[in-house]
Image (cartoon, helix red, strand yellow):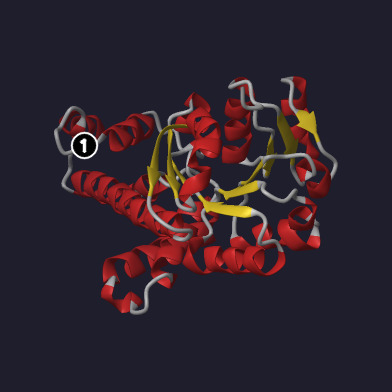
Amino acid sequence: MARTQRVAVLGLGGMGRLMAARILHAGLPTVVWNRNPEPARRLGEQGAAVAESPPDAVREADIVITMVTDADAVLSIATDQGMLAAMPDGAIWAQMGTIGVAGTERVAALVAERRPGVVLLDAPVSGSRGPAEQGKLAVLASGPEEVRDRIAPVFEAVGQRTVWAGPVGAGSRLKLVVNLLLAFINEGIAESLALGRALGLDRPAILDALHGSPIVAPWAAEKLERIGRDDYSPQYPLRLALKDVRLALDGVADASRFAVAERLGVEWQQLVDRGLGDEDLTVVTRALEG
């Protein structure tokens, strides 16, 4: 019988913490590390081993997951804090944060140059904190086919499905496509509700008309329910949604072709400047309604 894979999770923010909990509860030996030690301590109470540094977390790991905000943070953990040098040969590094096309290329170049014996997977996830808590994310994976069976128990622990998109870099590109659509759906909800209010309609009547409509997907339906309760607690913070829109535009040669996305980025930046960046992206609705 094959030995159970040992997993290290580095980065325990809103998503990483929930993903690490799912991996732990799936019965996989799990080591955790976070810059702020409190989330790691809480996972330690659930049975995870808590590492004091990135090298300590990965020295005996078969699979290493990084789940941090941007490419600079990933590269800092990998190089300045010594994670990559401490990884065993043959280990899998699943980079699961959303760091864009250029960021993923930087990570791939680093691994090729310094640790060719490490297998890199580019595997961002689609979904917010609710699906992460339930293990219902979609994993948008890319990388060598020969390690797919090894990584499968981890991806199955955090997600309800895995989409293999091709070689390293394809997963990050696919994630930008998905997140741009979510951005447009969110903006459509916000502007539709704001238009209804401007036309003199009561918000409950607008929400009632939209609930159950065939044009409202499950993600949008859940957001409408939260808007109806005036609940803007962060599932997908606006500042991160804005980051992802910008990563999408940065990933194409001629961003001017995507004028709606560019304008959306300008609008959302104004809201972040007003201090709304840590609210859920549905806070755009509240701002447009006035």
Q: In this view, does 283 lie above or below 45?
A: below
Q: Which residue is drawn at 82% across and 38% down?
A: 51
Q: The disc labelled 1 sits on which kind of residue?
A: Val
* Residue 57 seen by the camera: yes
Based on the displayed image, in which of its 4 quarters is residue 41 positioned?
Answer: top right
Q: Residue furthest front?
A: 1
Residue under the image location 40 percent in, 67 percent down: 266
Considering the numbered disc 1 on the image, is that residue within a helix, a strand or a loop? loop
As drawn, 33 above or below 117: above
Left or right, residue 197 beside residue 36: left
Q: Where is residue 103 in the image (x, y as percent from the top left)?
A: 55, 65
Q: Is residue 40 above or below residue 144?
A: above
Question: Dividing the image into 4 quarters, which one contains the N terminus?
Answer: top right
- Going 35% across and 63% down the picture, which residue do you hit? 264
- Residue nearer the viewer, 104 or 265: 104
Q: Which residue is more in the foreground, 244 or 119?
A: 119
Residue bearing mark 1: 216
